[in-house]
Image (spheres, grey):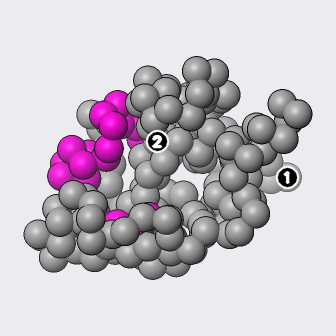
């Protein structure tokens, strides 16, 4: 009789920033990198992450720490889900290979450390204006913007719940 798979194995995808470079070195390439708060995970996020993963063999997601997320100005009570809970939800997704955090306002330092092959951001970013794009291109990587799924926004969802 076969035993059931361990449902918490996906938490092994979550790594401290200090360990991220070592763990990424073992992932299949090309490595795609994206980042965000991903506060209340919704269909738009999941579709975006699956699309990002399709550009490579592995997807690394860097989450804003709680402090970094608060500095984004989305409101004093945001994020609603703490960084550990957000990481667990992210790691549970099939499209995600590795989850880590960054505490700065942007992931520039982390991208410089990890050197992903492909940087992916949502379609609301002008990739040519991002310092992260310049860093990725400096070592031969690519930077791509992919469209969001219309009608899905954590901020809009929170506003709707409050009303």
**Disc number at residue 63?**
2
At mark 2, the secondary structure is strand
Question: Measuring 44% from the left and 51% from the top, which residue is drawn there?
Answer: 35
Residue 149 lies, in percent from the top left, at: 68, 69
**Disc number at residue 97?**
none
Q: Is residue 113 magenta?
A: yes
Q: Residue furthest front?
A: 163
Is residue 9 in sight in this rendering? no
Is residue 92 in sight in this rendering? yes
Whole-Å distance between the Cαs marked 2 and 1? 40 Å
**Disc number at residue 1?**
1
Residue 25 lies, in percent from the top left, at: 27, 57
Task: Write down the region rendered in magenta.
Answer: 100-121
Q: Residue furthest left?
A: 138
Residue 15 lies, in percent from the top left, at: 41, 38
Residue 46 placement: quadrant: bottom right
Question: Measuring 50% from the left and 70% from the top, which residue is drawn there?
Answer: 123
């Amino acid at each position: 009789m076969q035993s059931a798979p361990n449902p918490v194995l996906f938490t092994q995808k979550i790594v401290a920033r200090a360990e991220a470079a070592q763990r990424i070195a073992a992932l299949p390439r090309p490595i795609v990198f994206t980042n965000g708060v991903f506060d209340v995970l919704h269909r738009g996020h999941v579709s975006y992450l699956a699309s990002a993963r399709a550009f490579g063999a592995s997807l690394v997601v860097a989450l804003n720490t709680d402090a970094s997320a608060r500095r984004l100005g989305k409101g004093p009570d945001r994020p609603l889900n703490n960084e550990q809970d957000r990481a667990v939800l992210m790691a549970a997704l099939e499209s995600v290979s590795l989850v880590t955090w960054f505490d700065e306002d942007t992931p520039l330092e982390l991208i410089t450390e990890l050197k992903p092959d492909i940087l992916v951001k949502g379609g609301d970013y002008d990739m040519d204006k991002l310092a992260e794009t310049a860093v990725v291109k400096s070592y031969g990587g690519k930077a791509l913007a992919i469209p969001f799924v219309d009608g899905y926004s954590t901020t809009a969802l929170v506003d709707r719940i409050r009303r």
